[in-house]
Image (tube, helix red, strand yellow):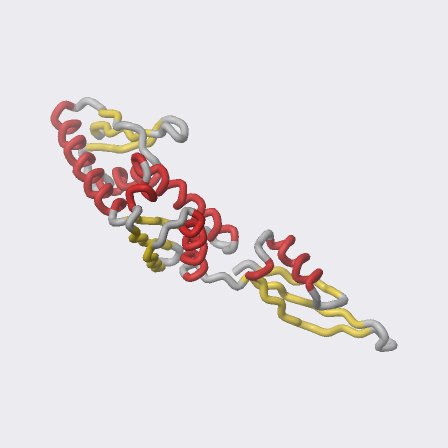
Amino acid sequence: MKKIQFETKALNDQTLAYAAQELRVNKDFIELNIIEEKKSLLGLNKSYLVEAVVDFNVINDGIEYLKKILENMSIEAVIEGKLSGERHVSFSIQAKENPILIGKNGKTLEAMQSLVKNYINLYTDEYYVVIIDIGGYKEQRKKQLEILATKTAMEVVKTKVPTKLSKMNAYERRVIHTKLSDWRDVTTVSEGEEPNRYIVISPSKK
């Protein structure tokens, strides 16, 4: 939870604006709490020690942010979110316009995921992994990648020749790495520069 402490002479909109500027978040998500009230010796002047806390729920506020994105696109959708593990957030979207939201090769989906990931991590002091799936596209794509990983690995084991896969985004590369992590006969490594990074599957050195 993001928070700061500071001293102020008044609790007003300027105080809230200052806290928002320091925390670099929207003031609507800030809660001000008085820790201590201070008075001068003669009691004429008064100041406050204040703690400004970011009040943000990664699931509920993440869904609201997604709703705004879709409203701007004039798309109605059902959105669900869940938190798994310590800091792993996933959102599922179902809409009539699923193909539009996914885009060619999932590029629109990836762009939306980056927006939501950056938004959530702006309001939290710990990094969250954010995954968005639309109409089950990610799950289907994951199965395709796992089949590709297995077939390619088997070919590499047979031929002893390293194989370079086509360029993939970070999520897709992670699926390949994870699928082959237990294989003793092959190794996987990501090479190249974004957005053209790819995976090379090589025979293990014995």
Residue 117's spot in the image, x, y percent?
43, 48
Location of the C terminus by quadrant is: top left
Side (left or right) of 123 relative to 184: right
The residue located at (34%, 57%) in the rendering is 79
- Residue furthest to the left in view is 158
Image position of 111 with respect to 66: above or below: above
Q: Residue 27 versus residue 203: which sits nearer the camera?
A: 27
The residue located at (46%, 62%) in the rendering is 57
Residue 68's spot in the image, x, y percent?
45, 53
Residue 191's spot in the image, x, y percent?
35, 28
Q: Residue 169 versus residue 154: which sits nearer the camera?
A: 169
Q: Is residue 84 visible?
A: no
- Residue furthest to the right in view is 42
- Residue furthest to the front in view is 74
Residue 8 occupies quadrant: bottom right
Residue 31 occupies quadrant: bottom right
Q: Residue 3 versus residue 60: which sits nearer the camera?
A: 60
Image position of 10 with respect to 139: above or below: below
